[in-house]
Every structure is written in structure tokens, then in C-alpha cells.
Amino acid sequence: MPLTTLDALLPLLRCPVCASPLAEKGLRCTNPQCKQASTPFHVAGGQPVLVDASDSILDPAAVVPAAPRQVRGLRALASAFGPKNRVAPRIAQLIADEMRHVTGRRPIVLVIGGGTVGSGLESLYDAPGHDVAAFDIFPSPNTQFVADGHRIPLADASVDAVVVQAVLEHVLDPWRVAAEIHRVLRPGGVVYADTPFLQHVHEGPHDFTRFTESGHRWLFRHFTLIESGVVAGPGEQLVWSLSQATRTIVPVRGAAAAVRLAVRPFAALIDRFGSRAHAVDGASSVYFYGRRADAPIAPREMLVHYSGAQHPISRTV
Ligand SMILES: [Zn+2]
């Protein structure tokens, strides 16, 4: 796996409070005026917690490695027969190809929320032509440091690609995180984001926002579109909805998973053969793959971007 190391990243690390370089293996800020110069950052699981405690939902002192999830019975079965992300592996390959054209340095792909390897992103960790840097709100063997995406503790223009999968619904201010992604990307760098549109609340108190396909494109308005669209369609949305509806009326452990198992074949047919335009309007999750740009797109471009089934022209026919 081309996972990089904390030592290799040290020259690129920046203080989340004052943006100065860090010293002592990322534990201390080099700016004597900064509060993190005299008070070192917390360490969790052997990794620095590079978080400004006064401006984050995270309490650095409370960060611990995530406990392994024990999923058994019907829930494990429903998970095993879960939908395959067919977009992420293809984009991962495009990113790996893109990284091969970077010259003069070894390219870095930054994974935000990389505590666990994302669905369909495995090949990104196998490609020999780049290094993978990753952070999450907990330390893991797949990360080098802990951080909050609202203040990515990396220097401006320090990475060549950013991957952020199933994360932007869990941050308080996704527009600020998108601006941070833009800041840490080198000119011409690429971003891949996949984010829920129609899914019920998950991760409890850490779930805040949803995006239509168009809203997601606008979130990345400072990027040139390479491609965007639907990751999981209305069939998968149906699985989520029926699962949650079951949970509200059947207080039996495993009931929602049983519904997921029963509905999934039907859902897979919908998403395989259904209208692509209607899928945009009823997606379970959407994606954006684009290149860092110097200026945002114009608001009116959003009307042309829309690829759903409710275009005003179709309503007049
Ligand atoms: Zn500082």
C-alpha cells in the first residue's frame, strides 16, 4: 500500500490554529505566539491530533482509536449483499492515471475521512505511482494524523488529488471543507467527492447535510467539472427508506436488515434499468469529479448543468 508516513508529511504539515509549520514530529507549532507552541497537540493511537480545540466539534483530548464494529447475523448478511460502488473504482483508476503524469515530485493523494478504506477505493492504495496521505476524526492504521476537515493541517497547494467519500454529510460546514480542499490542492489537482442525497440520518449526532446532484456541483463551484452524476439511484434510496420505516415500527433487532435483504434485488433492478434522468432526481448518493480552477463557475451555468427529468423544456411538451 502506498500509504505515506507522518515523517514524510512533516514538511507539509501546518498548525490548525495559525497555519505555521510544525516541529517535533507534528506535536508542536513553530510560531512562538501560537498557543500550540507551548502546549503540544494531543496524541491518540500514536498520531498527533491536529485540531484547534476552540473551533471544532472534536474534543482533541477525547479522541481515541475507533473500536472494531461487531456486525453479526442478518445485519452482516445485508451488508455482504450491499450495493457495490461502481463509480469509485473507475474514478480511482482515473486519479491513479492522472498521478502518473505529475513530474518533478512524488504525487500525494489526500483521503479525507480515510480511517477506513472507502467503498471501491481499494485500487487507489495499490497504485505504485503516488503516495496516499489520510486523516480522520480518529486514528487508524490507514491515517497519519487526526484532523478536522474544516481546517486541514496541510500547507497550501501541497497535494495532487483529494478523495472525500461519504464524509461531507458529516461535517458542519461542507462549503468550508470544499474551500479547504481547494486550498490544499496544487493548481490542476483533482477532487473526487461522493456524498448522500436521499439517505436517513446515520452516525447519529455527526450528520448534518444532504446534496442534490446540482447542489453538490455548486459545492465544488471552484472546480472545473470532469464528470458528475449518480453513485446509487432510487432503488438504493428505496432500501434506505423501507429500512428506516421498518425501524420506526418494528422494535426487533435485525428487522430492518431483513427488509434490506428482501428489497435489494428489486432495488438493484431499478438502479440497473431505470431512467438515468429520474435517477438524478431520486439518487441515494451523488458524485463529483473535477479539477481545481482559479475562478468559480457562474450561477447561471447551474441551469445547464442539471441532468434530471424535470427540465422546463420537457414540461412544455
Ligand atoms: Zn500555531
Image (spheres, helix red, strand yellow):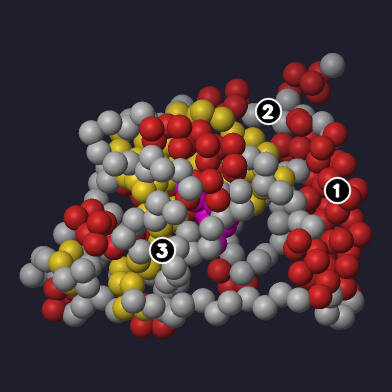
Which quadrant of the rendered structure holds the C terminus? top right
Q: Which residues are magenta?
A: 163-172
Going from N to C along the chain, the mark reached first, 1 or 2, is 1
Q: Which residue is mark 3?
A: 143
Residue 249, above or below 129: below
Which one is earlier in the sequence, the residue at label 1 or at label 3? 3
- Label 1: element kind: helix
State the image quarter where residue 244 is shown: bottom right
Label 3, secondary structure: give it. Answer: loop
Observer able to see residue 219 = no
Q: Closer to us: mark 1 or mark 2?
A: 1
State whether residue 63 is above or below residue 168: below
* Amino acid beneath label 2: Ser
Residue 116 showing in the rendered view? yes
The residue depicted at 50 percent of the width and 29 percent of the height is 225
- In the rendered image of this protein, does residue 82 appear above or below residue 271? below
Give percent across and percent down for residue 122.
Answer: 55, 50
Q: Where, by quadrant of the figure, is residue 43 drawn?
A: bottom left
Q: CA distance from mark 1 to mark 3?
A: 34 Å
- Residue at image mark 2: 307
Taking the magenta stretch, the answer to whether it contains residue 267 is no
Give residue 177's position: percent from left, percent from top.
Answer: 42, 52
- Which residue in the protein does label 1 denote? 267
Question: Where residue 109 appears, x then y in whole percent?
Answer: 39, 46
